């Protein structure tokens, strides 16, 4: 009879603990999800600012090209008025910057996804181990 009381006592203890750990697990997952969503919102904000700067740079380069193309040949700092080499160089720099920014964005998106997945897996594994530990008290 004493063994039956011990078994019921351990079941009585493990059930509320499991319910409590379920709530803690859910809170942990929600907390990590909130942190990652904040991270994503900050990245979106930075991306919109970078897009604005890229567009401003394009407009600035376009304005400079128009300005220097309209100068008389005598005043033009590029000699004979042929600034094609400079235009091509500037275009390559702008294209490189855009490719670089896209590569950084891609890496950032991948890092965010992998961080979310890894965090979720870690929380799941930790609480699974804790549940296994609690189950060891059951008879």
Image (cartoon, grey):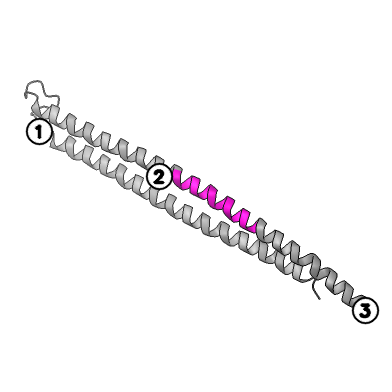
Residue 87 placement (x, y as % from top left)? 17, 37
For disc 1, the marked residue is 82
Answer left or right for 25 relative to 81. right
Secondary structure type for disc 1? loop
- Residue at 82%, 69% (x, y): give it: 10
Answer left or right for 105 relative to 54. right
Q: Magenta residues?
A: 25-41
Q: Which residue lies furthest to the right in this view?
A: 2
Provide the major secondary structure of the magenta segment: helix
Residue 96 placement (x, y as % from top left)? 29, 44
Mark linked to residue 28: none
Mark linked to residue 1: 3
Q: In which quarter of the image is residue 88?
A: top left
- Residue at 93%, 76% (x, y): give it: 2
Q: Quadrant of residue 54?
A: top left
Q: Quadrant of residue 130?
A: bottom right
**Nearer-N-terminus badge (1/2):** 2
Label 2 near label 3: C-beta < 8 Å? no
Mark linked to residue 44: 2
Q: Residues within 10 Å of mark 1 (few under 14, many from 20)?
A: few
- Residue at 15%, 32% (x, y): give it: 65
**Nearer-N-terminus badge (3/2):** 3
Q: Does the magenta stretch include residue 33?
A: yes
- Residue at 64%, 58% (x, y): give it: 25
Q: How crowded is mark 3: few (under 14 residues within 10 Å), some or many (20 or more)?
A: few
């Amino acid at each position: 009879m004493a063994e039956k009381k011990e078994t019921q006592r351990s079941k009585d203890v493990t059930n509320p603990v499991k319910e409590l750990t379920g709530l803690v697990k859910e809170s942990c997952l929600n907390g990590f999800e909130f942190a990652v969503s904040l991270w994503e919102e900050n990245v979106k904000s930075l991306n919109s600012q970078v897009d604005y700067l890229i567009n401003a740079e394009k407009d600035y380069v376009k304005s400079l090209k128009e300005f220097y193309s309209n100068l008389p040949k005598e005043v033009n700092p590029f000699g004979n008025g042929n600034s094609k080499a400079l235009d091509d160089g500037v275009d390559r720099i702008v294209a490189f910057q855009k490719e670089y920014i896209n590569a950084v964005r891609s890496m950032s998106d991948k890092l965010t996804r992998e961080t979310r997945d890894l965090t979720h897996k870690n929380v799941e594994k930790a609480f699974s181990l804790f549940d296994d530990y609690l189950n060891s008290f059951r008879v």
